[in-house]
Amino acid sequence: MQNAIDFLSADLVLRLIIGFAVGGLIGLERQKKLEQDRTVGVRSFGLHSLLGTLASYSFVVSGNPIILVYATAISLLLVGIQLYQKIIRSMRKGMTTTIVFAMAYVLGTLVGLDVPPEGQLVGTLQILAMTVAFMVFLVLGFKDELAAAVAGVSHDEMISAAELGVVILFFWPLIPETIPVPGLTDGFPIFTTYILIVILLSISFANYLLVKKYKERGKYFFGFFGGFANSEATVSSLTETYVKTGRKNPGSFAVSTIFANLAMVLRNGILVILLDPTFQIFGYYLIPLSLLIVVGLIRLLYERRKFKHEEEPEELDTKLVSPFEFGAALRFAAVFGFILYISLVAQALASDAGFLIVSVIGGLINAGAVVTTAALTFTAGGISLATAVYSVIIATTMALMNKIIFVYQADRETTLARLVLRDGLIMTVGVVIYIILLSSGAIPIA
């Protein structure tokens, strides 16, 4: 048994504060909706969780469970009274308050039972309790928004979301880091490919929700947020929509394509930062990134001023343009895997020159895959900084120009194709000059 001085420790004071806070935070949201026939708010929730903290902590320091059993019985009685008051006496529907009131006691109990590692004031169970309390607060605080979102979810969307959950929760522990592949001594990094699929699907799901919410401006939202996931698929979908709506306002769809390109350029920059924490590649990518953003924004302002008085086409059909497709993610994984494999083999056989050739071809297919491969290979010491910089910039430049291929493939009528080609050329002129300066040594690469 601990001595009396332990009960005055900083650990105990912090434990009591957290014990009240995890219940009080939930009660704070309930307090906002306090009605005459509701009897629980911040104080009731906070004291209920503090009861669990005191009872469980007394068990930890004494080893005697009698107080914990007694407190649990009291908690069950309080929950029962609250449930009776809610349903029998007031005849009101819903059990949310009763459920979260019971959860407050459990969270407080977790805080009291926790034994933090030596040197730490907060332990794992306490962090868990605080995290759950915050999540419950968010769920309760945004219940109207959640209800509206759920009401608008179709059966197919629910199935897709469930499939995404399966991919993340069940396959994560089963995927190995690498698998043996001919031609690669260290094996193929299959887990990296899997992580990229998860990221792509998650981003695509968020993109889809935004497009669905803002249908009246859907093509712009879809162009930008869809470009983060897959700019090539986004431009193809935009062009198909342009054709289906009678080829109205090609300028507005050209602006949507610019949005997709800008998102792709930003995404590549984010990938470089995440995969190369030394920021060496990003230091050289920052100049073309700035050029592309500035030129792209100028083109956006110019085009918007041209067609702002024109009649807007009909809303996008989210079933047609939804970026939340497993097929698109799997195609990206296949392209990424192929480019990564060829790049690793080419780097082993032909050194940096082979990697640059792959970057040119791969950039036409999917720049994100090339950028990811270049950053990962550089971080692992497989290629030089110069090769990584050239690969990232060249792949991004090729991805700006490849949109004309996807537009022309979906619509052989050349009005939109000419606009997309012009925008692509304007955006890449500065980048090409920058590449020439790099290659000539005018801007040296350390």
Image (cartoon, grey):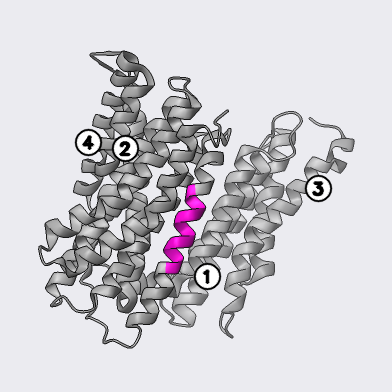
Task: Return the residue at label 2.
Answer: 170
Task: Return the residue at label 3.
Answer: 13
Residue 38 seen anywhere in this rendered image of the structure? yes
From the viewer's side, name the closer residue of 287 and 1: 287
Q: Position of residue 198 (x, y in %)?
A: 34, 43
Q: Nearer the viewer, mark 4 or mark 1?
A: 4
Question: What is the CA distance from the residue labelled 4 to the residue labelled 1?
Answer: 41 Å
SS at mark 1 in the image: helix
Task: Return the residue at label 4.
Answer: 334
Seen in the picture, residue 192 relative to 79 is either above or below; the reply is above
- Does residue 117 appear to the left or right of 87 in the view shown? right
Which label is found at residue 141? Answer: 1
In reply to whether residue 291 is colored magenta, the answer given is yes
Q: Main secondary structure of the magenta part?
A: helix
Label pair 4/1, CB-CB below 8 angstroms: no
Seen in the picture, residue 268 relative to 74 is either above or below; the reply is above
Query: How many numbered marks appear?
Result: 4
Q: Residue furthest right?
A: 5
